[in-house]
Amino acid sequence: MPHKDPAASGQRHEQRAPQNRRAFHKGWRKSIPTLLAYLFNIFLLVLVSHAEHASNPENSPKEGFLSILSPDFLYRTMLGSPEPPAQDVAVIAIGSEMPGPAKESEPSTACMRRIYIAELLKSIRETGPRTVVLDVWFDPGSCSNSDSQPLWQELCSFSADVPVVTGLASYTRYEIISDWPAEFADIKRRGAALKPSELVSQPAVPLNFCSTKRLTVGTIELDEDHRKIPLSWPVYDTFDAVGDPARFHRIDSLSVAAIRARDPKSPVLARVGAIDEYGAAKPSTNSFPYTTFLGEDDLPIVRAVDVICSNPKDYEWGQFCQSSGAKRLALNTLFAGKVVLIGGSGSGADIHDSVIGRVPGVVLQAEYVESMLKNRVYRAIPISCQIVMWILWLFLLFGISFLTSSGAKAALYLFLAVSIPAVLLHQFFVHCKFYTPLLLPLTVSGVFLLISRRLELFLSKHEEER
C-alpha cells in the first residue's frame, strides 16, 4: 500500500477549508433572496387567513388587515361598477332640521321625527310602493304616547296594504365596554361571554300595538367592512340574557328583512341562506357576501319635506307648503313598485365611510337592497379553498423560477404564470358570483418572487466573476 504523508494530507485539508467556507458563504448569499421570498409569501398567507375573520359590527375595532392590499378603488375595479341608475329602491332623507307647521309646543327631535314619518306615510300611501323600510329606531322612552300615537295609527293602517319594516337598534360588545361598564362587569362576573359579532338589542317600542303581520323588524347594524351585506346578527334581548342559549336568537338585517317583506320567496334569499330547503324563512348563518355600489347620484334620494309637500294630507301642512318653497315631485314615478327607505341624513345622522364616500346609513341600506334585487351578491370563497389555491399557485411560481436559469425567460414565464391565471380566475369567479381578496396578494407575491429571482441570478453571476 502507498504510504500517506500526514503532512500533505493536513495541507490539503487546510486548502479545502477556505474553499468550503467560500462555497458556504456563496450559497448562503444566493439563498437570501429565496428565503426572503418564502418569508414574504408566508406573511401574505397569514394576512389572507386573517382577512375572512368573523363579521363584526361597524363600530368594533378595525381588524381588516387585508385592506392594506385591497383598497376600495381596486375593489371596484375588480368587480366593476353596476349599471346605473337604481331601479328598485328610493330613499327619503329626513334632515336634522325638520320644518313644518308651527306648533304651540315644539316636540323634541325624536318626537318630531315620528310626526314626520306619519306624514310621510300618508303622502306616499297612494303612490304604490312595494315595501317601506324605516331605518329608524323607536325608543320607547323618548316620546309621550300622545306624540307617538299618530305614527302608531298610521303604521297599522299603512301596513295593512303595504309591508313595513322598522329598524331594531342594539349594543355591540365595544359599546357596552365603553358606555355600560357596570353591565359588562356583571356579564363577566357571571362567567358569560359576548363575542364581537353578538349584539344586545336596545329597548324598542313593541309592534304588538298592531295586529297586522306585515309590520316586521330588522337589525340596523352594519358590518365594519361596508362592502359586505349584513345578513343577520346573533342577538340577546337584554344584558341579563347574555350567556343564556335559550334567550339567544338571530334577527334578519334590515336589508334582508326588506327583501323578505317584498317577496318571501325571492331567489336571492335562497342564495344567501335565508330560506331553508323547504322554502321556510330562517335567519341566514352564511358569511356576509360582498357587493358592488352605485354612485350616490344614481340613487333616487329626495327630501322628506318635498315628499310631504308634493301630496299634503293635512290643512296645516298644505298652508305651510304653499310658502315653504318645497319642490313638487312626481311621487307615483318615484315610488311605484319600489322599496322605499326612510332614514336620517345630515348633521347628527349615522354617517359612514364607504366605497362611495361618506354617506348616511340609509343610503348603504338602499345599496344593499338594490344589490340583492339585482343579484349583485358575491359570496366569499372559504379560506380553506383560498389556501389551497395559494399553495398550488406558489408551487407553480417557484417551479418556473428555479427551472429557468435565464433572467429574461424567468421574467417572461413568471409574468405569464401570474397574469394569465389571475385574469382567468377573476373572470370565472365574477361570472359565478364569487369574490376572493386572494388574487391581489397572489399577484404581489409573483412580482416579489420575480424580483428575488432576478436578484439571486445577479448575485450568483457576481460571485462567479469574483
Image (cartoon, rainbow, N blue to C red):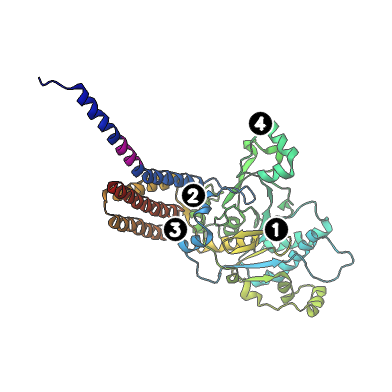
Taking 158 as reference, is 369 left or right? left
Left or right: 96 with respect to 449? right
Q: Secondary structure at mark 2?
A: loop
Viewer-nearest of discs 1 and 3: 3
Residue holding disc 4:
191
Q: Quadrant of the N terminus?
A: top left
Q: Which residue is disc 2 drawn over?
A: 278
Label whose residue precedes the other's in the sequence (4 or 1): 1
The residue identified by callout 1 is: 136
Q: Residue at x 65, y 35 (%)?
A: 244
Q: CA distance from mark 2 to mark 3?
A: 24 Å
Task: Say what secondary structure mark 3 lies in.
Answer: loop
Disc 1 to disc 3: CB gap under 8 Å: no
Magenta residue span: 21-28
Give the numbered dot on residue 433: 3
Identified by mark 3, the residue type is Lys
Between discs 3 and 4, the one toward the N terminus: 4
State yes or no: discs 3 and 4 in contact (Cβ < 8 Å): no
Q: Is residue 34 magenta?
A: no
Q: Are marks 4 and 1 in contact (CB under 8 Å)?
A: no
> Counting residues from the N terminus, which is met first, the one under dot 2 or under dot 1?
1
- The picture places residue 25, in percent across and down from the top left corner, at 34, 39
Q: Nearer the viewer, residue 347 or 364?
A: 347
Picture coordinates of residue 424, whole percent (x, y): 36, 59
Question: Residue 24 in magenta?
Answer: yes
In the image, what residue type sits under mark 1?
Answer: Val
Q: CA distance from mark 4 to mark 1?
A: 34 Å
Q: Main secondary structure of the magenta part?
A: helix
